[in-house]
Amino acid sequence: MTIPHDFTADLPPPRDDEPASLRQDIIDELTDHLECATRRELLASGGRQSPVSDELTTAQSRALTRFGNPAKIARRLWLDAMQEKLMAQKITLTLASVATVACIVLCVLMWQALHQGQEAQAALLQQHQEFTQALLKEFQSLRSNPEALPPTTGWSQLTMRLVSESGEPVEGQVTISGTPIGGERADVNFVRDVGPDGQVDIGLVPYGNYQAKVVATEAQETHTEHFMVTPSEKSDLTIVCPTEPPPAVDLSFAFNPPELLQTADICYIVSLKPHARRYADSDWNVTVEGSDGSLDLWVDASGEILNQFAKQWGQLAGSGMPAEAQGLKLHPKPILREYLYELSYGRVVYPLSTVPSGYSYVDKMAIPSDATYSPARGTMSKSLEPRHETENLWKIEFSDNMWARIIQDFRQSEEARNITIPEGWEAVTVKGDRIEGRVTVHERTNVMVGLDSEEGFQGWNLLISSAEVISMSINAGSGFAGQEHRYVLLVRPDQKQALTLAQSRGLKFFLRESDEDEDEPVLHESVLEEIEALPVSFGSPRRGHG
């Protein structure tokens, strides 16, 4: 039985995501239902199934009436089958549209915010510039008219005056330092010169605690004054200053060298620290170089202060006193005045002939050795307050341990001090650590004095100029300890040659003229003849040296 009806009339056009058999399945389903309905109608009317009979047509008509429009039913079935996919597409499209609109709105809002921010920054910058200009004008007005200073600014006008006890102005210099109260402002630190009128206008300063370091130019003294600046009040600080330094004094020293050293060629370096003096109910300190305010003095063996001294401990020349030399800056003798002095430390300096073993440099341009005193290790010296137009003698006693060290150094060099030096020669005393050694003489200015050992060549390098030995550096191995031997190197400056005479057990020295490495040392006959002809005598050797 055929159902003459178009089921696909109301179906939408085919879609790419539509299942291939969906439409045919719907047609087949509807056809089956209509055929079943038509049979029921035929049975109900008693007719037979015949495609040409009127009963069939009537039955089909009644079945369609009961069933409804097949095309609409087919469309509803198709929509039911495609509902999930259609809904997913609608949701996706809706979300995409919403996202697009949101992006457009966000971009518009961002552009508006940026534009408004630029306008706000421009307005704020303009206000800041106007405020800065107004504040600058206000500060200039307050500086020119301190009386108009408002009571809530937290700044004060500070003026300082330096006067003498009689009220006369005093020249000087003022250093202001301190920290404003509250911690919101940076520390204050500046220097102002005080002219002949004795006044200096510091200007506006924030309130807080300060200190003024005052230097009285004529008196060469300093004083530190502590003061407070209160807000909104004009501060006028007056400091009474000395107009001249204390009177100068003469000072000499007396030391306590043992009898063995009373005639020795030694000198002293003493460092004195002056105490503050009271002037107009204030403490004033002497103005000196150095952070500790100490004075270094060079004193000869008789206790007299030398007119010049070197802060790098000077030089020894001739009698052992400081002398001029290239590269050495000599300082004038400090002027001592009526202060209370305290001994900070002292040194005993002794000449080249007493250099103990182990010193790294033997240089006639420098002090080779000294012994140091300090109150913590030596005998504490009492303070001294010298007076004007009075003989002031300061007795300083160094400890026995300190003098014992110096005596030991002197005794160790006894042989060197007893050597008779031929005319035209200079002597340098050194000490060796092996019984075999070598001396190399060159035509140039480089002279090597060395010692051979199992560990290799060890020794000293000496440089001689046309006049004297310049320097010596020691390079001795640790295995040489306990094998000490002293010898004397004689230098004849005019010929730039070095000759060696030894006073020790089995000490042998070989001399040669070239610096080339050779298996055996070469003895130069002319040098040997000069050695034999030298009228050199030695003192008695010290024990332990053979």
Image (cartoon, rainbow, N blue to C red):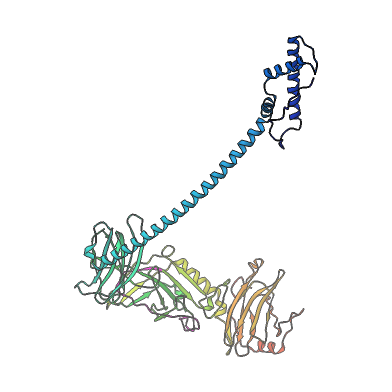
Does residue 199 belong to the magenta stretch? no
The quadrant where residue 161 appears:
bottom left
All told, the count of numbered labels is 0
Q: Where is residue 397 in the image (x, y as percent from the top left)?
A: 40, 69
Say if 8 sits above or below 389 in the image: above
Say if 48 sits above or below 13 in the image: above
> 9 or 289, which lies in front?
9
> 515 or 458, which lies in front?
515
Locate the N terminus and report the quarter of the image it occupies: top right
Identity of the residue drawn at 75% across and 12% down? 42
Say if 35 sits above or below 540 in the image: above
**Residue at the extreme left of the image, as rendered:** 166
> 112 or 382, which lies in front?
112
> 55 or 170, which lies in front?
55
Say if 39 sits above or below 441 in the image: above
- Is residue 186 visible in the rendered image? The answer is no
Q: Where is residue 190 in the image (x, y as percent from the top left)?
A: 35, 67
Q: What stretch is highlighted in magenta?
A: 316-344
Report whether 348 appears left or right of 218. right
Report whether 357 appears left or right of 144. right
Identity of the residue drawn at 73% across and 27% down? 6
Locate the C terminus and report the quarter of the image it occupies: bottom right
Q: Where is residue 505 in the image (x, y as percent from the top left)?
A: 66, 75
Does residue 334 belong to the magenta stretch? yes
- Is residue 348 visible in the rendered image? The answer is yes
**Could you tell me what secondary structure mostly forms the magenta stretch?**
loop
Identity of the residue drawn at 55% across and 81% down? 418
Q: Position of residue 123 (x, y in %)?
A: 39, 57
The quadrant where residue 139 appears:
bottom left
